[in-house]
Amino acid sequence: MRSLKPEDEELQRKKAELARLETELAERELELATLEAELRSFERTYLVRVGRRYAELDQLEAQIAEATAREHPQNEPARVEAEKARSRAAESADAVADAEDTASRGDFKPSDTLKKLYREAAKAMHPDLATDEAEKARRERFMVELNKAYADGDEERVRAILREWEASPESVKGEGTGADLVRTIRKIAQVESRLRAIHAEIGRLQTSELFELKTKVDQAATEKRDLLAEMCDHLDDRIAEVRRRLNRTRSERI
């Protein structure tokens, strides 16, 4: 039995290392994509339920500030505050409108099949497995489509993207010991770099205010409490109070 040349043995070791890293990368990409989609879904729910009330509060506060500015036309700070209040009201109203447009999607709950398909696709077409810029750009286009389909929960679209990838001539690559070893080593470095970036991004998301709020809402749900409903009740009281202030402001001008 012929023994392998040292470079062939090294290539085998590196390919085994790369295979392990590719599996880990696909899993971490899935973890990141799932977290991002869950946070977007939660943010939509929050804006539709709670954000809508903040938008109403901003609208009422803007009306009060504008009434004060009209009452004192020479008061520059009052005019500036009225403009700021109106800008805040417009921004919060736009955010709620955008959330309501996509609220029909419901909560993001990917099936096991969808997750499995995503892992398979990400492992095959990940940009950090490219060996040149042209291939990386092509892989990035596929990954953008893949992430969108996954976030939309569109299993058929994920399947179609994977089929398209597997049918493309560019997905078939030749072999060659020396060059293959260099390519494999470079791929390992690229994958390790991406893994570090994913770890950092997940860490950033998990320390965000949105994630913290979602965690509290999820924890409250285990205690049979609807934390968002409690927040809505509190805001309804504030809205009633500010509305009374606005009515007093209007009546004082009569």
Image: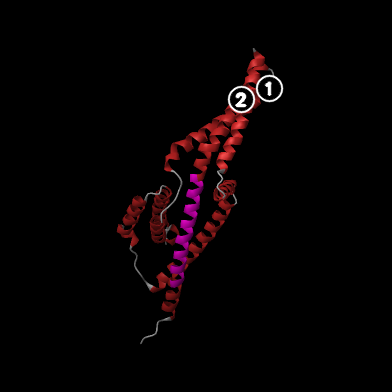
Image quarter of residue 251? top right
Q: Which residue is mark 1?
A: 76
Image quarter of residue 184? bottom left
Q: Secondary structure at mark 2?
A: helix
Crowding at label 2, few (<14), some or many (≥20) Cα neighbours within 10 Å? some
Q: Main secondary structure of the magenta part?
A: helix
Image quarter of residue 121? bottom left
Label number found at residue 60: none
- Looking at the picture, which amino acid does disc 1 mark? Glu
Q: Residue at x 59, y 30 (%)?
A: 57
The residues colored magenta run: 16-41
Q: Label 1 vs label 2: CA separation?
A: 25 Å
Q: Which residue is mark 2?
A: 243
Decide which of 137, 59 is in the foreground and name it: 59
Q: Is residue 166 above or below residue 219?
A: below
- Looking at the picture, which amino acid does disc 2 mark? Arg
